[in-house]
Image (cartoon, rainbow, N blue to C red):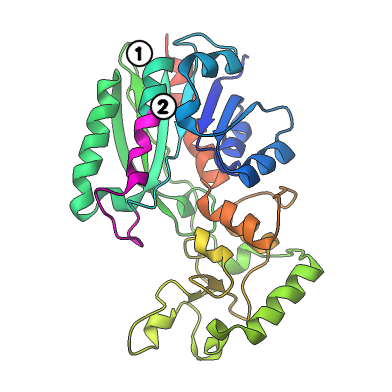
């Protein structure tokens, strides 16, 4: 059977791309502006066409030419517009410029007219005053000619050993008979200890992290933390809520971009005074052990912190393939 097609925007280091590939999709084009992320994409998907640059500079005609498709032929249009402006960890300001990049997604969606679209964002979009932005986004997506539903899903119920709640928008073009749907949870949470079974480290990287654990001031009170606690649990000023000693008997907490800064808002090993290796973060994020990341330790961890978890996206893509595309006349 012919593979369903997908174009990925805000593709990052390939988390969503890998999910679609695992689900049996043919990715025709990935759009990403960060040079390190683009290098990572090319390392893992050498035949994939990558548009490296500002998404606002990509025209609908160029996207069609690069993907080899006509208007309306694309099966899935995917994107995860940068979400820092919506995040509960940020200031969540209406005027945050990063909240407007979804308009570029809408522009391409309108021009390409795919059968289905998927848009991922943080849970903060439906909390507090940001609900107004959520309503605006939902209205604009529907105005593109789609039936749209949004749901909060947690990646830890889809094979990812990480507590990571995300808001998933799914739209189905109005001329199609199917309704948007979401994958049902299918796994019990996997613990951090289970995820790291038989993990193999890069020796030099492990040495670097252990040395940083001995010298960096952020690890000075590591021994005072119980597994699962953050520094805000032991400090009078309640600072350091995002610096957490991971509980080995629970899923890993959310891996964020800041985990790529040693000691600053990162995750700490429960048994050793250090952060986690790239190999360990791959396990927490459901990337295969042989997945390649360009650059240094911090680059790789930041790519994973920003990524859509591959097995999470695989579940979403398989549901679209089976319950929407395959029953569409």
Quadrant including the N terminus = top right
Quadrant including the C terminus = top left
Tell me, yes or no, whether the highlighted magenta stretch contains residue 19. Answer: no
Residue 251: give x, y in percent of width and height: 51, 64
- What residue occupies the far right of the structure in this picture? 203
Tell me, yes or no, whether the highlighted magenta stretch contains residue 93. Answer: yes
Magenta range is 87-105
Residue 292: give x, y in percent of width and height: 72, 48
The image quarter containing residue 248 is bottom right
Q: Nearer the viewer, residue 269 or 320?
A: 269
Answer with left or right where residue 303 lies relative to residue 101. Answer: right
Query: What kind of element bears circle 2?
Result: strand
Residue 14: give x, y in percent of width and height: 60, 41
Query: What kind of element bears circle 1?
Result: loop
Mark 1 lies on residue = 176
Q: Which mark is residue 117?
A: 2
Please tell me which of labels 1 and 2 falls first in the chain.
2
Instruction: Tell me the residue at 54%/65% (across/down).
Output: 259
Instruction: Tell me the residue at 26%/28% (across/down).
Output: 140
Instruction: Tell me the residue at 22%/36% (across/down).
Output: 136
Instruction: Tell me the residue at 33%/14% (across/down).
Output: 177
Residue 113 seen in this snapshot: no
């Amino acid at each position: 059977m012919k593979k369903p097609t997908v174009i990925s925007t805000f593709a990052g280091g390939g988390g969503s791309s890998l999910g679609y590939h695992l689900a049996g999709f043919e990715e025709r084009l990935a759009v990403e502006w960060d040079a390190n992320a683009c290098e990572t994409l090319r390392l893992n998907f050498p035949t994939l066409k990558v548009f490296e640059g500002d998404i606002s500079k990509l025209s609908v005609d160029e996207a069609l030419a690069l993907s080899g498709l006509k208007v309306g032929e694309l099966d899935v249009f995917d994107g995860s517009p940068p979400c820092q402006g919506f995040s509960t960890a940020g200031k969540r300001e209406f005027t945050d410029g990063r909240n407007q990049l979804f308009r570029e997604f809408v522009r391409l969606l309108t021009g390409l007219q795919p059968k289905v679209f998927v848009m991922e964002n943080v849970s903060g979009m439906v909390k507090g005053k940001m609900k107004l932005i959520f309503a605006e986004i939902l209205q604009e997506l529907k105005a593109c000619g789609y039936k749209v539903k949004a749901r909060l899903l947690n990646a830890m119920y889809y094979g990812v050993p990480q507590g990571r709640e995300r808001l998933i928008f799914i739209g189905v073009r109005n001329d199609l008979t199917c309704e948007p749907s979401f994958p049902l949870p299918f796994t019990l949470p996997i613990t951090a200890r289970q995820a790291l079974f038989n993990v193999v480290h890069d020796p030099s990287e492990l040495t670097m992290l252990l040395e940083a654990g001995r010298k960096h001031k952020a690890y000075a009170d590591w021994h005072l933390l119980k597994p699962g606690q953050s520094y805000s649990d032991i400090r009078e000023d309640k600072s350091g809520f995002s610096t957490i000693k991971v509980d080995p008997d629970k899923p890993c907490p959310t891996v964020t971009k800041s985990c790529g800064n040693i000691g600053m808002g990162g995750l700490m090993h429960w048994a050793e005074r250090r952060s986690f290796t790239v190999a360990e973060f791959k396990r927490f994020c459901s990337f295969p052990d042989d997945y390649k990341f360009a650059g240094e330790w911090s680059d790789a961890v930041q790519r994973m912190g920003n990524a859509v978890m591959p097995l999470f996206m695989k579940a979403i893509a398989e549901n679209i393939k089976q319950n929407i595309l395959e029953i569409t006349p």
